[in-house]
Amino acid sequence: QVQLVESGGGLVQAGGSLRLSCAASGSAFFRYAMGWFRQAPGKEREFVAAIAWVNGITIYADSVKGRFTISRDSTKNTVYLQMNNLEPEDTAVYYCAAAFMVGTTSTDAEAYRYWGQGTQVTVSS
C-alpha cells in the first residue's frame, strides 16, 4: 500500500515558478514509477512527467519539456515537480501517482494504481 500527499500548489503569474512535492509513505519504492498528471476544468486528465524510482529514468509530455523537471529524493521518499516559465495553460489540479513497475515509466494513467488528492496550480496572465 502506498499513500501519496501532494503540496506546493498555488497562484503564480505567467513566467513564474512553483515546485510541487509528493510525499510517499509505504515501502519498496524502488519497485515503482512515480508520475505527475494534471486535469484542467472541462478537460481530461493528462500526463505531465514520470520517473522510475530505482534508476531515475524520466519522461515528459511535449508540452512541458524544457520547462518542468521531475526528480526524487530517496532519503525523504519524496518526488518533486519543478515547474519553470509557467503559462496560463498550465493551470490545473496536479496529481501525483505511483505505478508498480521497476526501472521504467509510463504515460498511461491506467498504469498508475495509487493517487494523491491533488494540488491546485493557477497561473495568471
Image (tube, rainbow, N blue to C red):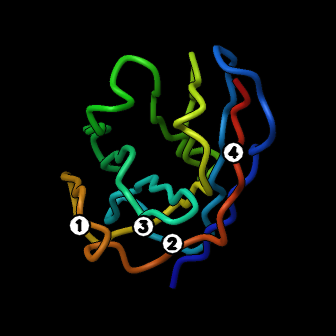
Which callout, 4 or 3, points at the residue further toward the start of the chain?
3
Residue 96 in picture, x, y percent from top left: 53, 60
Q: Which residue is tagged 2? A: 27
75 up-or-down from 68: above or below: below
Tell me the distance, in whole angstroms, between the alpha carbons under discs 3 and 2: 12 Å
| Closest to the observer, 96 or 12 | 12
| Closest to the observer, 49 or 72 | 49
Which callout, 4 or 2, points at the residue further toward the start of the chain?
2
Q: Secondary structure at mark 3?
A: strand
49 up-or-down from 105: above or below: above
Q: Identify the amino acid type marked 2.
A: Ser
On residue 98, which mark appears? 3
Q: Secondary structure at mark 4?
A: strand
Tell me the distance, in whole angstroms, between the alpha carbons under discs 4 and 3: 20 Å
Q: Which residue is tagged 1? A: 101
Q: Which residue is tagged 4? A: 121
Q: Quadrant of residue 82?
A: top right
26 up-or-down from 54: above or below: below
Tell me the distance, in whole angstroms, between the alpha carbons under discs 4 and 2: 29 Å
Which callout, 4 or 1, points at the residue further toward the start of the chain?
1
- Few, some or many residues within 10 Å of mark 4 (<14, 14–19, 20+): many
The reply, left or right, for residue 23 in relation to residue 66 is right
